[in-house]
Amino acid sequence: MPPKFQISTPMNTEGSNSSSSLDMTKLTSSLEATEPVKALLHQGSASDSLTGVKRPCLVGQGSSQSPHEVEISENSSSSLVGQTKPPKWSRSLDSEMDPKKLKRVLANRASAHKSRLKKLEYVEKLEREVLVQQAKISALAPEVAFKRAQRNMLQQENDEMRRKMEILEKKKADKDAEFTKLKHERDVLALTRALQEEGL
């Protein structure tokens, strides 16, 4: 009988590396899918604005960078205008990193990104409240001016009444002094008349 030859297939080591890279890509894509895209909150601040979605891609072997390095490319079909700053959680990561550590790093970066977005939303909310309060102040300004003018008018009337009261008080004091003087003269005349009658 002819000898039997057993053909053994070598293990595909590149498949494991590519599966690891694909897992990392899927993880990053899933994080990006769940992460809301915020519009430009402050047009003057390029660092705080988020105007596009970043997608990870693997660099080919012909590139000057290593084949395991992941770089973030800007989405050319984005309709938002302005300079964008890639979020920290989407920076280049080494695909050979431990999957658990990679997942933890991406989760931390996504959490920090969400925290920054919440801070921006809180600042925007405060700015809206400031605008609302300023609108209320502008609406109440005419009424405040009217009340202030009315207060000034009442203050003038009060001052006038005080001056009149002072004049009347002065007249009353003069009348009281004159009354006291006349009363004294009456008493003197009465005493003089009584003495004259006794002398008779």
Image (spheres, grey):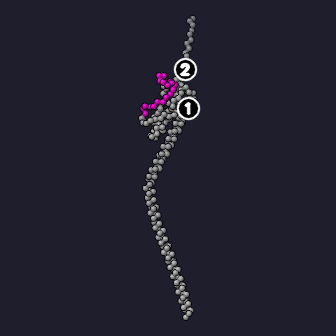
Q: Quadrant of the C terminus?
A: bottom right
> Is 8 displayed left or right of 40 in the figure?
right
Nearer the observer, 136 or 155:
155
Identify which residue is drawn at 44% across, 60% down: 149
Indicate the amino acid at tag 1.
Val
Single out the mark in the foreground, 1 or 2: 1
Residue 1: image location, x then y, percent:
57, 5
Q: Residues within 10 Å of mark 1 (few under 14, many from 20)?
A: some
Inspect this view and state whether residue 14 appears.
yes
Inspect this view and state whether residue 30 appears.
no
> Magenta stretch?
61-78
Nearer the observer, 180 or 131:
180
184 in magenta: no
Indicate the amino acid at tag 2.
Thr
Identify which residue is drawn at 50% across, 39% down: 117
Residue hosting label 1: 105
Q: Secondary structure at mark 1?
A: helix
Q: N-terminal of the two: label 1 or label 2?
A: 2
